[in-house]
């Protein structure tokens, strides 16, 4: 007997960068994933966020054009 499993597609959203870079915790606040920096700190340090496909635990990680951050199957592309 074969079992078919459906994998939910990841959603992509663009974030328009207004400067040279944005910190990861600030990105999460700007896109509405979290309401506070404290909440951003927790989810980042617990390894729930990926940057460019790899788990990132540095809340001050600088994201520049071409980078991406993923949380809960949504990928935020920095443009």
Image: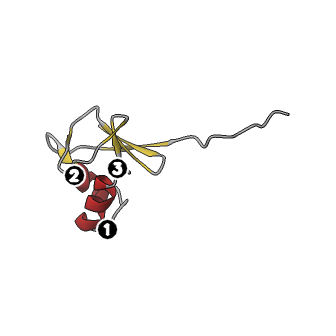
In the image: residue 23, left or right of residue 31: left
Query: Residue 49: where, in percent of width, then height?
Result: 35, 48
| Left or right placement of residue 8 versus residue 72 in this view | right
Mark 1, other Cα within 10 Å: few <14 / some 14–19 / many ≥20: few
Q: Any mark on residue 35, and which?
A: 1
Q: CA distance from mark 2 to mark 1?
A: 15 Å
In this orientation, which residue lies closer to the viewer: 12 or 1?
1
Tell me the SS state at disc 1.
loop
**Numbered tag placed on residue 47 in the rendering:** 3
Who's the residue at 81% across and 33% down the image?
Answer: 2
Contact flag, marks 2 and 3 (Cβ < 8 Å): no
Nearest to the eye among marks 2 and 3: give it: 3
The residue indicated by pointer 2 is 59
The image quadrant where one finds the C terminus is top left
Looking at the rendered image, the quarter that the N terminus falls into is top right
Numbered label tally:
3
Q: Quadrant of residue 33?
A: bottom left
Is label 3 in a helix, a strand or a loop?
loop
Report how far apart the C-alphas of labels 1 and 3 lie in the structure: 18 Å
Viewer-closest of 42 and 11:
42
Could you classify mark 2 by the number of other residues whose Cα lies within 10 Å: few (under 14), some (14-19), or many (20 or more)? many
């Amino acid at each position: 007997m074969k079992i078919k499993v459906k994998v939910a597609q990841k959603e992509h959203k663009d974030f328009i960068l207004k400067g040279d870079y944005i910190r990861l915790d600030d990105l999460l606040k700007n896109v509405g994933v979290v309401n506070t920096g404290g909440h951003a700190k927790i989810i980042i340090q617990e390894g729930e966020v990926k940057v460019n496909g790899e788990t990132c635990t540095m809340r001050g990680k600088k994201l520049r054009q071409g980078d991406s951050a993923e949380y809960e199957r949504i990928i935020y592309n920095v443009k």
